[in-house]
Amino acid sequence: MRLGKRGKRGEAQRLGPRLDQIVDLDHPLVKLAQRIDWGFIEQRLDTVYRDGPGQPPLPTRLMAGLAILKHMRNLSDETLCEIWVENPYYQLFCGEAFFRHTLPFDRSSMTRWRQRMGEAKLTVLLQESLHLATRTGAARPADFTRVIVDTTVQPKAVAFPTDARLLHRAREWLVKLARKHGVALRQSYKRVGKNALIRHQRHAHARQFKRANRALRTLRTYLGRVMRDIGRKIGADASLRERFASRWRWRAGFTRSAIASAPRRSTACTRRRSNASPKASRTGRTSSASRSRLPPRCAAAAAGSLSPMSPPCRAIPMTATPWPRCCRRSPARTAPR
């Protein structure tokens, strides 16, 4: 049903002073309500209503004023409704003539009104706010030529770039690119590659890192097979190499840097089994007899060498040479006490 004329809304039947007689007319909300062109807003938003039977809609001045107050004060619908009943300035801004002690609408009516108007119609409020800023001198038209938006905390549809997902997506794009240019692959690994990615995610979520690394190596193997297969199929075809290189930005054709540069775990030095009790083994306090039965270090270990992945030692300098197999014990056990 189309919205009728608002009129004075039964001012003659109401008792008590008007809102404009009891509020401060120099209040910012009162001045803002006087400067906004409510007729322009009602003319644009009333086009969504049609003539016909049904309940009359809520006044456009009321709903538009609530929408402006919601974004000005950064309030939720529930909080805005609670403050609206208590604040006479909010009621005057929304077009009320007398103070109301109850809400003239339901909270869900605000959601239905926004859905009914749509995003295109609600841009009228933004247009009027910009036009009001230029009319009052708060802004110049030149200020709207460039808009800077800070999206630091804005949520974006970007997945976290894990190694497994990157390897999986690289294989998918290679297969898609090969099919686009008519390169017949020996195997696309579509089904098994997806299964390997799911296994990696499940094992990583369960903190089963050995199994997760095994699935990661499988994904890396599938990607390497596809890269080598495409490299063999295109051969010395300069046009295909240029197409693949332009798409993936590879300079000299196919390169295995994506696989060779992937970090691989190295085994850290481990301590040999001793005859100490479990409690002494956990605390690191072994008897002198147990320490005397440990084999002496060889010349290479005495010279000082340590794996890059092992923890630092107080007495042995850290170098890139791995520990020899004859003395696979913790460097902390050999440090002087």
Image: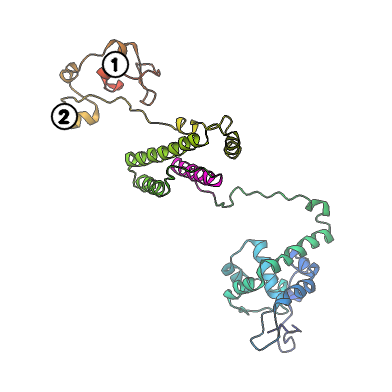
Does the rendering let one see residue 203? yes
Question: What residue do we see at 51% from left, 31% from top?
Answer: 255
- 10 Å neighbourhood of mark 2: few (<14), some, or many (≥20)? few
Q: Nearer the viewer, residue 155 or 97?
A: 155
Q: Nearer the viewer, residue 249 or 182?
A: 182
Numbered mark located on residue 195 in the image: none
- 10 Å neighbourhood of mark 1: few (<14), some, or many (≥20)? few
Which percent across, then down, holds residue 206?
A: 34, 47
Left-right relation of 112 to 307: right
Q: Amino acid at mark 1?
A: Pro
Does the rendering let one see residue 86? no
Left-right relation of 113 to 299: right
Please determine whether, in this image, residue 98 is positioned above or below residue 304. below
Q: Secondary structure under badge 2?
A: loop
Which percent across, then down, holds residue 158?
A: 54, 49
Question: What residue do we see at 15% from left, 18% from top?
Answer: 289
Left-right relation of 257 to 272: right
Q: Secondary structure under badge 1?
A: loop
Q: Quadrant of residue 332?
A: top left
* Disc 2: which residue: 277
Q: Quadrant of the C terminus?
A: top left
Please determine whether, in this image, residue 151 is positioned above or below residue 302. below
The residue stretch that appears in magenta: 158-181
Please determine whether, in this image, residue 296 is positioned above or below residue 284. above
Which percent across, then down, holds residue 252?
A: 57, 29
* Disc 1: which residue: 336
Dominant SS type (magenta): helix
Q: Nearer the viewer, residue 82 or 132?
A: 132
Which percent across, then down, holds residue 16?
A: 71, 83
